[in-house]
Image: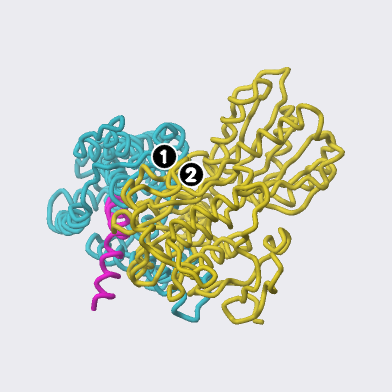
């Protein structure tokens, strides 16, 4: 019996270790006399997704800014950022970027504990005199990708592999669904949740389940390229996520949502370096960078908005805009150009928009504010499947 | 009918690495050695297999890739064998250490393979069919051959086996290496077939499920086939049923963990202590006991 208890305990310990994604911290080389910026990552730098994108941006910043020195710690569990921050402060980091939503409260606590260090937290909403927030958000790009998916689906079912049903994902899923419906009012977006940021096996089976239920276009918000690979194996159009995943499936990656965190990092660090940002004036500094700042991009690959293999098909697909029939491709290009311009006139969340239960969420003439987008609980029409924490009315 | 076939195919696809890894674990546990390092050995196998198959982007030899994965798993297992059989350290602690070591080493060495697709992908069915055949062969060997009898007697009563002139240390080493080789093969399945690419942490707990599976099936290779399919089915259904049953999403995401607990509880209730090798987890010292 004792043997079983020991095995049981060991299993529990092992599963917990896996769940927490613990792995040894990695340190980057450092020299003195430069501005030292340090990064805390939630996943491994090699996840090909969220953390990989942040780390590529860190490398790009190092390349662009000769006075910059960096260091990073990876696979830090959410809610355990404080000890990592303590260590980085002891290592004389002057700017600390914490790159996951779950680090928000720890970052704020650290900002209060270390008033002489500059903090910047990604994807959150709490700020301090020495703590800014930043986010490169995809909701516009998800809408554009939704147009593509709506135009390409023959079964009228588009699959969406979601990570956690939090506001960020609801915002992206709903924008995607609004795009799908704009191009194809009869289509639906089927969602399956993983409740994990990174789990290739779950992504594989969730994708297989969506395909088995009839989806013929797939997109995934998980951090690996598994969604793309699964779609490719079943010859189904799909989308790059965070980074270019074009090389994983040159025939089936149609477009995608690609992030360029380096735009934000370089801007922020330059302003710290030239004294614009100090430990006293960050309470209102919130980067919410979208298409027109170049922080995000619609694309199958960097610089390739639509895979050339699908251009003809998208040109032939028609959708109705303000009573007129236009090609989906032209609409995509027109909206992309608009949202990339200094003063965009189009927003996916411009009212009137009802949620999938018929409640009016955005009145006519209004657009959702950043705060609304950050607190979004409802989901758009066209979304099929369970969505946790959805308001009843 | 189509739905059922779909579910069965997915259960087999997900269950194949579980079956391979747990067959390996059954053999080393039948010889009396617990190795909780399955997750780490799988990660090492996944990386080695991918590295060789990738072959610098040109596409390497898939047979070599599979051999490399098995060799990496076996090498890691031999480390465990040395620590626990020769040095007589605690098998549970050594196994946990091996998991952490394997994941860490694979993550570190794997950095340069991250983000690359694998185009020379082997088909799935030889792995699945091979795993099932292997389970049947192992069942026969363990039950009906001299080798199987030797192995089991060493797991049940190493002192008696020693008196009979069997080399306990040698057989335990071989059994542990065999377990490692199969864990490595399971890893190669993940990085070559199941999701043909390498990423840090891609085993994501599958090794632990394999460890639990061994107890669930009561150290029987034949039952391991059904156990692996059962786990695969439940794993697939957590997504297939999502949105189509009144059970909330969060419940499904807790499924693998709940499963392990349920499985251990069932194993306990069925009194499977009886089918566990008597000396499982105990180091053997000649002359003691």
User: Is A179 included in the stretch rendered in magenta?
Assistant: no
**Predominant secondary structure in magenta?**
helix
In the displayed orientation, state which residue is furthest to the right. Answer: A280
Q: Is residue A259 left or right of residue B150?
A: right
Q: For the residue carrying disc 1, how many other residues have a C-alpha within 10 Å: few (<14), some (14-19), or many (20+)?
A: many
Confirm or deny contact between disc 1 and disc 2 (CB under 8 A).
yes
Up-down relation of residue A143 to residue A266 (above or below): below
In x, y percent, where is residue B26? 29, 54
> Count of labels shown?
2
The numbered mark 2 sits on a residue in which chain? A
Q: Nearer the viewer, mark 1 or mark 2?
A: 2
Q: Is residue A86 shown left or right of residue B115?
A: right
Q: Quadrant of the C terminus of chain A?
A: bottom right
Secondary structure of residue under mark 2: loop
Label placed on residue B115: 1
Furthest-front residue in this view: A324
Give the number of the disc on residue A243: 2
Tell me if residue B281 can be seen. yes
Residue B57 position, x and y percent, is 30, 33
Q: Place residue A355 in its image quadrant.
A: bottom right
Chain A representation colour: yellow
Tell me which segment is drawn in magenta: B1-25
The residue sitting at the left extreme is B145
Instruction: Indicate whether residue B4 is drawn in magenta.
Output: yes
Residues A351 and B212: in front is A351
The foreground one among A138 and B26 is A138
Judged from the image, the secondary structure of the residue bearing numbered disc 1 is loop
Give the quarter of the figure containing the N terminus of chain A.
Answer: bottom left
In the image, B189 versus A268, the foreground residue is A268
Q: Colour of chain B?
A: cyan
């Amino acid at each position: 019996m004792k043997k079983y208890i020991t095995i049981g305990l060991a299993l529990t310990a092992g599963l917990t270790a896996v769940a927490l994604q613990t792995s040894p911290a990695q340190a980057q080389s450092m020299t003195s006399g430069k501005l030292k910026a340090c990064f805390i990552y939630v996943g491994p730098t090699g996840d090909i997704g969220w953390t990989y994108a942040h780390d590529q941006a860190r490398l790009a910043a190092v390349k662009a800014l000769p006075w910059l020195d960096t260091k990073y710690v990876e696979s830090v569990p959410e809610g355990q950022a404080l000890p990592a921050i303590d260590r980085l402060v002891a290592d004389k980091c002057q700017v600390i970027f914490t790159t996951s939503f779950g680090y928000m409260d720890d970052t704020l606590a650290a900002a209060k504990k270390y008033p002489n260090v500059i903090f910047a937290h990604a994807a959150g909403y709490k700020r301090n005199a020495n703590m800014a927030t930043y986010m490169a958000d995809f909701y516009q790009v998800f809408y554009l990708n939704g147009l593509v998916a709506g135009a390409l689906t023959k079964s009228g079912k588009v699959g969406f592999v979601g990570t956690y049903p939090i506001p960020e994902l609801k915002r992206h899923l709903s924008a995607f669904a609004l795009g799908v419906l704009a191009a194809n009012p009869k289509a639906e977006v089927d969602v399956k949740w993983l409740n994990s940021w990174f789990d290739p096996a779950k992504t594989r089976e969730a994708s297989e389940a969506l395909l088995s239920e009839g989806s013929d276009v797939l997109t995934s918000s998980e951090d690996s390229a598994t969604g793309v690979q699964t779609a490719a194996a079943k010859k189904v159009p799909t989308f790059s996520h965070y980074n270019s995943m074009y090389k994983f499936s040159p025939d089936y990656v149609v477009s995608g949502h690609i992030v360029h965190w380096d735009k934000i990092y370089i801007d922020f660090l330059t302003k710290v370096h030239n004294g614009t940002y100090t430990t006293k004036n960050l309470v209102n500094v919130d980067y919410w960078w979208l298409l027109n700042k170049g922080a995000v991009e619609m694309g199958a690959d960097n610089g390739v908005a639509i895979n050339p293999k699908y251009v003809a098909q998208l040109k032939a697909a028609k959708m109705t805009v303000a009573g007129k029939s236009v090609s989906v491709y032209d609409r995509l290009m027109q909206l992309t150009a608009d949202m990339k311009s200094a003063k965009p006139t189009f927003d996916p969340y411009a009212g009137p928009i009802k949620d999938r239960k018929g409640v009016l969420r955005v009145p006519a003439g209004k657009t959702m504010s950043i705060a609304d987008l950050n607190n979004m609980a409802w989901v758009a029409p066209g979304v099929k499947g369970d969505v946790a924490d959805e308001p009843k009315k | 009918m189509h739905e059922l076939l779909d579910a069965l195919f997915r259960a087999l696809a997900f269950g194949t690495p579980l079956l391979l890894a747990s067959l390996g674990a059954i053999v080393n546990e039948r010889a009396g050695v617990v190795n909780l390092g399955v997750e780490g050995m799988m990660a090492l196998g996944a990386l080695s297999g991918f590295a060789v198959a990738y072959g610098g982007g040109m596409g390497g030899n898939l047979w070599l890739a599979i051999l490399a994965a098995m060799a990496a798993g076996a090498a890691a297992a031999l480390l465990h064998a040395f620590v626990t059989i020769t040095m007589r350290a605690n098998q549970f602690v050594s196994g946990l250490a091996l998991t952490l070591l394997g994941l860490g080493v694979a993550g570190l060495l794997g950095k340069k393979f991250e983000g690359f697709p694998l185009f020379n992908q082997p088909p799935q069915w030889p792995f699945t069919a091979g795993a099932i055949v292997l389970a049947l062969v192992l069942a026969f060997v363990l039950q009906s051959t001299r080798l199987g009898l030797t192995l089991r007697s060493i797991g049940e009563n190493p002192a008696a086996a020693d008196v009979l002139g069997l080399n306990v240390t040698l057989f335990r080493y071989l059994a542990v290496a065999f377990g490692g080789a199969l864990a490595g093969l399971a890893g190669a399945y993940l990085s070559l077939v199941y999701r043909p690419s390498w990423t840090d942490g891609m085993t994501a707990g599958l090794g632990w499920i394999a460890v639990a599976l061994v107890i669930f099936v009561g150290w029987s290779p034949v039952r391991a086939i059904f156990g692996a399919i059962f786990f695969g089915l439940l794993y697939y259904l957590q997504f297939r049923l999502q949105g189509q049953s009144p059970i909330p999403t969060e419940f499904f995401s807790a499924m693998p963990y709940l499963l392990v607990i349920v499985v251990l509880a069932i194993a306990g209730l069925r009194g499977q202590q009886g089918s566990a090798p008597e000396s499982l987890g105990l180091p053997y010292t000649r002359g003691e006991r």
